[in-house]
């Protein structure tokens, strides 16, 4: 047998594999950290992600990915669904040195978003109060 060929057996079927052409298969499980490469409008952006589930649909088994969408001052968690029909998105294993953010960086951005939303709520409540007080008489007879 040649140096670059190997015989393997799968379910009783023997196959000769050319190791120069063999593909590396990554095995993933729920909870694995991965990187998601996703197409934006005109380019691709890499996101830190976690596999959160597998949907075993008969025709399109699907990997469910939760990923961080990190912007300048915000961070949100979004979902991507990858199956045989998926275009413009792919995953690969993540390396520990390849994580550009700390846990605290992400939490700080999320907390900033929470405070912005709380301020929006306070503003809307103030507008509602103003509406009831200023326009309440107008709508009493209508």
Image: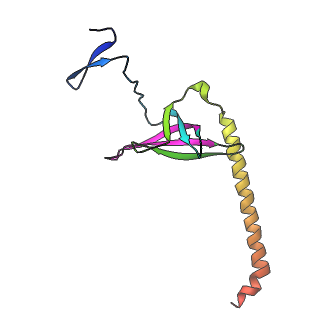
Residue drawn at (32%, 17%), measured in percent from left and top? 18
Whether residue 32 appears in this view of the structure is no
Residue drawn at (40%, 27%), measured in percent from left and top? 25
Query: In terms of depth relative to the viewer, which is nearer, 53 or 11?
Result: 11
Look at the image and say whether residue 133 sits in the magenta stretch. no
> Which residue reaches farthest left?
12
Look at the image and say whether residue 57 sits in the magenta stretch. yes
Residue 80 placement, left or right of 135: left
Query: In terms of depth relative to the viewer, which is nearer, 73 or 133?
Result: 73
Residue 52, position as x, y percentages in the image: 47, 41
Residue 108, position as x, y percentages in the image: 71, 42
Q: Is residue 8 above or below residue 38?
A: above
Residue 39 placement, left or right of 61: right
> Which residue reaches farthest bottom?
141
Q: Main secondary structure of the magenta part?
A: strand
Q: Is residue 12 above or below residue 102?
A: above
Residue 96 placement, left or right of 131: left
- The quadrant in which the N terminus is found is top left
> Which residue reaches farthest front?
42
Residue drawn at (54%, 29%), measured in percent from left and top? 94
Q: What's the colour scheme?
A: rainbow
Q: Is residue 81 above or below residue 12?
A: below
- The quadrant in which the C terminus is found is bottom right
Residue 52 placement, left or right of 14: right
Query: In terms of depth relative to the viewer, which is nearer, 44 or 140?
Result: 44
Whether residue 55 appears in this view of the structure is yes
Query: In terms of depth relative to the viewer, which is nearer, 109 or 8?
Result: 8
What is the span of residues highlighted in magenta in the rendered image? Answer: 45-69
Residue 140, position as x, y percentages in the image: 71, 88
Residue 22 lies in quadrant: top left
Count the labels in the image: 0
Residue drawn at (29%, 9%), measured in percent from left and top? 2
């Amino acid at each position: 047998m040649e140096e670059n060929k190997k015989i393997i057996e799968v379910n009783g079927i023997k196959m000769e594999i050319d190791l120069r052409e063999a593909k590396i298969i990554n095995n993933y499980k729920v909870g694995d950290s991965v990187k998601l490469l996703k197409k934006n409008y005109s380019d691709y952006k890499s996101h830190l992600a976690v596999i959160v589930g597998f949907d075993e649909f008969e025709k399109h088994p699907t990997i469910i990915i939760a990923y961080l969408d990190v912007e300048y001052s915000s961070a949100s968690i979004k979902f991507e669904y990858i199956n045989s029909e998926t275009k413009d998105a792919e995953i690969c294993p993540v390396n520990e040195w390849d994580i550009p953010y700390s846990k605290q960086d992400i939490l700080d951005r999320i907390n900033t978003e929470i405070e912005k939303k709380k301020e929006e709520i306070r503003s809307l409540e103030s507008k509602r109060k103003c509406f009831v007080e200023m326009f309440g008489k107008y709508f009493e007879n209508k």
